[in-house]
Image (spheres, rainbow, N blue to C red):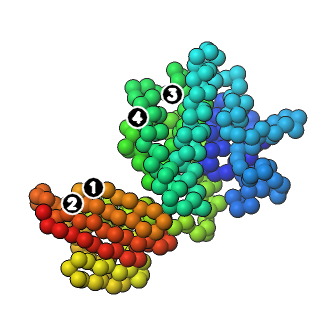
Amino acid sequence: MKLFTSPLACSMASRIALEELGRPCEFLQIDHTTRLAPDGSAIHPLGMVPVLHADGGRVLTENAAILQYVAADSPLIPTEPWQHAQLHQWLSFIGTELHKAVFIPLLDRKANDGAKAYALGNAPARLGIANARLAGRDYLLDDYSIADIYLFTVLNWAQATPVRLADYPALAAFYARIAARPNVARVLGAEVGAFVVERKGAPAAPLSTRAVLDRFNAAFQTHDPAGLDALIDDACVIDNTDGQRLTGKRECLAVWTRIATDPQLAFDLEDTQGADGRGTILWTLRRDGTPVARGVNVMEVRDGRIVHARGFTRPI
């Protein structure tokens, strides 16, 4: 039996299941650029993983199907009818509502800012369902199952997106609990290592407009400007309502760093919108705890960096 995989992709779920059960399988990593097998052959019309080559030349695709095949007749698949039906329910939910509706657009370099914003908007309700399910329980079903393995694999992608697992305490606890299982930790470590080797030297995709704005806001809310340098374009311009214009990365970074590190200032975010290179940030400024001004920043972002910012402020 051979399983074609890509590091940290959804194929990791099947690999974890096989390791948990101690079932023999040969793991073959596809080329992430060509999407071909190590021997140069095509494994899937869309270049997708996982793909399982079973005995007798049989080929199986789709993550949920492969998980059920490799874990057949094991404790990872419940036999009691209601539990078995719930297994299918959660495999379907994870595959459609989390994997495809939320994380694929957020991770896809070709997805535009509008698609990413739509996917991010889908996240709270869908992650909230899983979070509610796991409140007060260890697993999605009565016992550990392939549904938990699939959910863990998908949640692992959150760290590469604006989704914050910390906003979903039961999911965060679940992720930590599954990650601590010895076989899971071993597979995750191997996949992270393979991913680093595979992507070494590959150009990083620029941040989306919304991601840039979220990181920009975080610098002011945490009083930590360390990340601002990477967000500011060399030709950045700031225009303020007082007529002040700052030009160039050095001037923009200096003024934003000064504001971000002032311990007397605090910003309450009221709204942040960002897509396709344009964004707005609506805020209230407090000095020593007292609201003193409201304002909006209108931002232009290009290739993951701020190129122009306009500030409009009025005192309270």
Quadrant holding the N terminus:
top right
Q: CA distance from mark 4 to mark 2?
A: 31 Å
Whichever of labels 2 and 3 marks the residue nearer the N terminus, that label is 3
Q: What residue does disc 3 label? A: 140
Residue to which mark 4 is pinned: 170
Q: Nearer the viewer, residue 296 or 178?
A: 296
Q: Residues within 10 Å of mark 2 (few under 14, many from 20)?
A: some
Residue carrying label 1: 270
Name the residue: 21% across, 69% down.
313
Camera-nearest residue between 230 and 113: 113
Find residue 298 and report its image quarter: bottom left
In this rendering, is residue 200 above or below 124?
Answer: below
- Image side of residue 100 versus residue 46, left or right: left
> Which quarter of the image is occupied by the C terminus?
bottom left
The spot of residue 30 in percent (x, y) is 73, 54
Disc 3 and disc 4: Cα gap in Å?
11 Å
Mark whose residue sits in front, 2 or 3: 2
The amino acid pointed to by label 2 is Thr
Mark 1 nearby-residue class (10 Å; few <14, some 14–19, many ≥20) = few
Which amino acid is tagged 3? Leu
What residue is rendered at 16% in x and 64% in y?
Answer: 293
Depicted 165 relative to depicted 220: above or below: above
Q: Of label 2 and label 1, which has the lower sequence position?
A: 1
The answer to whether mark 2 and mark 1 are in CB contact below 8 A is: yes
Q: Is residue 255 positioned above or below 29 on the image?
A: below
Where is mark 2, residue-wise? Answer: 284
Residue 178 position, x and y percent, is: 50, 35
Please give left or right for residue 233 compared with residue 93 in the image: left
Q: Residue at x 20, y 79 (%)?
A: 242
Q: How packed is label 3: few (under 14 Cα within 10 Å), some, or many (20 or more)?
A: many
